[in-house]
Image: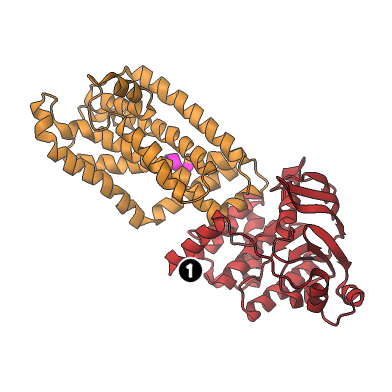
Amino acid sequence: MIKVENLSKKFGEVSAVDDVSFDVAAGEVFAFLGPNGAGKTTTIKMLTTLLKPTSGSIEIDGLDPATHSNEVRKRFGIVFQDSSLDQDLTAEENMDLHGVLYHVPRKVRHERTEMLLRLFELWDRRKDFVKTFSGGMRRRLEIARGFLHTPKILFLDEPTLGLDPQSRNQLWTHVKNLNKTEGVTVFLTTHYMDEAERVADRIAVIDHGQIIAQGTPDELKKQTETDSLEAAFLALTGSSIRDESADSADQMRQMAKMWRK
Amino acid sequence: MNAIYILWLRELKRYTRSRAMIVASLGQPLLYLLVLGFGLGPVFQKAGNGDYIQFIAPGIIGMSVLFTSVFSGIGLLWDRQFGFLKETLVAPVPRVAVMVGKTLGGATVATIQGLLVLAICLIAGFRPVNWLMLPVALFFMILTAFVFAGLGVAIGSKLQDIQGMQLIMNFVVLPIYFLSGALFPLNGLPSVLSVLTKIDPLSYGIDALRYVLLGTSQFAPEISVAVLGVAALIFVGLGSYSFSKIQL
């Protein structure tokens, strides 16, 4: 379903992604793990047509995102690291807007909106503005929205960041269910190793822009002679701390948070 | 087409739901109208230019259309920072459709705002010479709104943070406003100022409003239509171009 060969992305002199290759089969749950700044989000941006690769090839359901971007965009849903909802619209309006942008016929749009909002336990709050939602509710709404146009692939970029264990647990249960019932391929990144171990069929570990290990959770543990995925991860990537510099968008978000309080 | 419609509708919903913002945004024109209108009125009258409220009302309407349309485009900055922009950029619709929806929405909102200010002017004592010309005034408001909604999107696509907004306000929006003849007549100005006012598209928008509402004007109305039309094409084109170049 996703086929990546020798993918690289350079920003000036810096290689964010360096000669990365992997395959994700249809229906698989694939976890992409790595420390901050390892190149996870850059890879997702290239897979989802937001960035053009410097070199290498990508196939999404047999199509190149660079040349067939609209065709590729119809085939995936994405939940970004930070919210991409319109907070001044209601949950239902966010769903509807998404459905129209993805050319989902009105009838299907309404049926699937109801089905997904009920599944993610947001149906009773559908008429409420998103700005009144908690972090967990927003994430659920975003994931529900990602499923609305029946995508073949769902990208989840750190979807559980900042959620309590209850919400995280519930969120993955729903994703796993939809993975089974709708056969959607899931490509996720997370910093919570227990989540990756629980939901992922296969895992790739990326560090400094390169894939340093790939396999099932058990294979990775065996390879590093550790007994948990977290230990395996640390064995592979070392324990030094990576600091990302904050860009203007991060600063803005900080300010926005201050204003809300 | 549906994508353009739903994004236009989004702009409209956001506008009509922020009632506090609407009231706040009417405060400034009201201040200009009442303080300047009545404050400078006697001086204006003595200089032999007639009733200042009559003169300034089209200028204040133009100001509201300018501010509302530019800032709706600059709203892209918020969409960018709060993430909604990403949702539209990964959707399977051409970017130009997203841009057109945004611009149409901004222009619609700015026109509504212009009409609200017109209503306030009427309450404050402004009287158009010919009521039947009001639809033509509406046409010029729409045209002006398009010019500056396009400019707003062009700027909004480039802006990275909120500090830039202050810069745009002081070095783009306010000069466009003050050089437009919204507050003073354009005849008999020093030559540098006169040239600047003539390259300001808003001058033509406000002048056309004066032509329609008061029956007096500096430029021929055909020229105003032509300048506004060309400016709208240029700025909307520029807006689509810079919007198509957005990288996240």
Residue pointed to by mark 1: A132
Write the residue at 30% across / 44% down.
B116
Count neighbours of disc 1 (C-alpha within 10 A) and say few if under 14, some if 14 to 19, many if 20 or more: few
Identify the amino acid type marked 1.
Thr
Could you say where residue B206 lies in the image, as x and y percent from the top left?
31, 29
Specify the quadrant of the image occupied by residue B56: top left
Q: Colour of chain B?
A: orange
Write the residue at 14% across / 25% down.
B49
Chain letter behind tag 1? A
Could you say where residue B151 lies in the image, as x and y percent from the top left?
47, 36
Element at label 1: helix
**Residues drawn in magenta:** B105-109
Specify the quadrant of the image occupied by residue A177: bottom right
Write the residue at 24% across / 21% down.
B189
Could you say where residue A252 lies in the image, as x and y percent from the top left?
50, 58
Q: Is A110 displayed left or right of B191 in the figure? A: right
Colouring rule applied to residues: by chain
Can residue A184 be seen from the camera position used here? no
